[in-house]
Image (tube, rainbow, N blue to C red):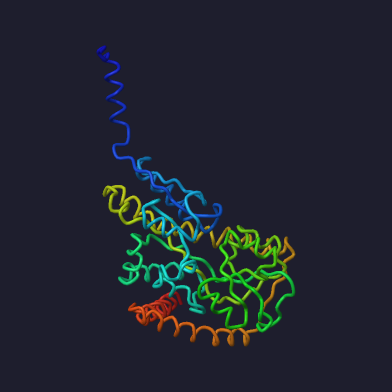
Amino acid sequence: MKKLTVAAVAALMTTALTAPAFAVEWNVSVWGKRRAFTEHVEKMKELVEQKTNGEFTMNISYGGLSKNRENLDGISIGAFEMAQFCAGYHRDKNPTITVLELPFLGVDTLELERELSEVVYDHPAVEADLARWNATLLMPSPMPQYNVVGKGDKPSKLEDFSGLAVRATGGIGQAMEKVGAVPTSVTATEARQALDSGIVQGVAFAPHAHMSFGTVEGGQWWTTNLNPGTVNCPVVVNTDALNALSDEHREALMSSVEESLDHYVENYNTNTMGKWDPTLEEKGIEKVTFGEDEIAAFEEKAAGPIAKAWVEEMNGRGLPGQELYDLVTKTIEEKKAQNQ
């Protein structure tokens, strides 16, 4: 064997000193395309790579790793290290966080949705619920109140929803059922096709999703003020992968959560909502606004009965349903009082 020259040895030593000693690469499973809903994940990737000088990298896959309804399953077996999912896609897998999807909770800003989610995520019963899937809750994906884009005859009163198939999941679907609609839980990526083909006559989404998934392309009307609730979609990490991180890398990840959420909320409030009214006008979508009395009657019909049924179901499972519901209502009340 030939001896290495002094220059070669020096080059090898330089490479060893400059190369990352403990490079970590995480795979992240989301779906659709990059949009307001994934901006905190994108920001997290950017911040973590900056803080670790490229030693900790994230590969964000939009549908290439898993179907959106199977992301929690993928996390549980370590198929990828981070993922986003929506509680309403599989209520039985994550019953505790569905408290955040109950209708008419009175959450009226992204900032409040963010704070409320973080409080609930910290509850021991919620942590234990997700631990069954080897998952640790990292951050929420705060979204505004859902409303419906539809095709065909526009509803002029709530009873006009009777018999209409509406893509609506979780508590929103339960609320729509109270006014006679037929909730259908097609996934976000299937929603436009379902609307175009007539499988559903309406789709309940937040504004960013109506734009991202194309329901505005075929929609003819938009409900401005149903505001029955929203969907809770956490970002989770595989607990084993989190625990395997070095202290430095874990700190880089965890210290980036709040800044990532700040970026998400600012982007949603400024960019997404700034585009919404112009998009409706451009597409010729007519706004449908219901009277205050009708909205109040809708809330009375849906809010109390659905919340009561949720609490009873959770209690029957041995989960602290009443405690979680009280935590939500108390937190909303306290946060609104602080912001007055």
Residue occupying the point 60% across, 57% down:
212
- Using the rendered view, name the quadrant where residue 294 is placed: bottom right
Say if 3 sits above or below 273 in the image.
above
In the image, 103 versus 36, the foreground residue is 103
Residue 155 position within the rendered picture, expressed as x and y whole percent measured from the top left: 70, 78
Taking the image as shown, residue 105 lies to the left or right of residue 227, namely left
* Residue 145 found in image quarter: bottom right
- Percent across and percent down for residue 214 are 65, 59
* Quarter occupied by residue 158: bottom right
Whether residue 138 is situated above or below residue 288 in the rendered picture: above
Decide: is 171 above or below 62.
Answer: below
Question: How far across and down, in percent of the image, does residue 77 sit?
Answer: 36, 55
Query: Viewer-proximal residue, 259 or 123?
Result: 123
Quadrant showing the N terminus: top left
Figure label count? 0
* Residue 327 image point, x, y percent: 37, 78
Q: Relative to 104, is 53 on the left or the right?
A: left
**Residue depicted at 38% across the width and 54% down the height:** 256
Residue nearest the observer in this picture, 253 or 1: 1
The relative height of residue 298 versus residue 79 in the rendered view (above or below) is below
Looking at the image, the residue that sits furthest to the top is 2
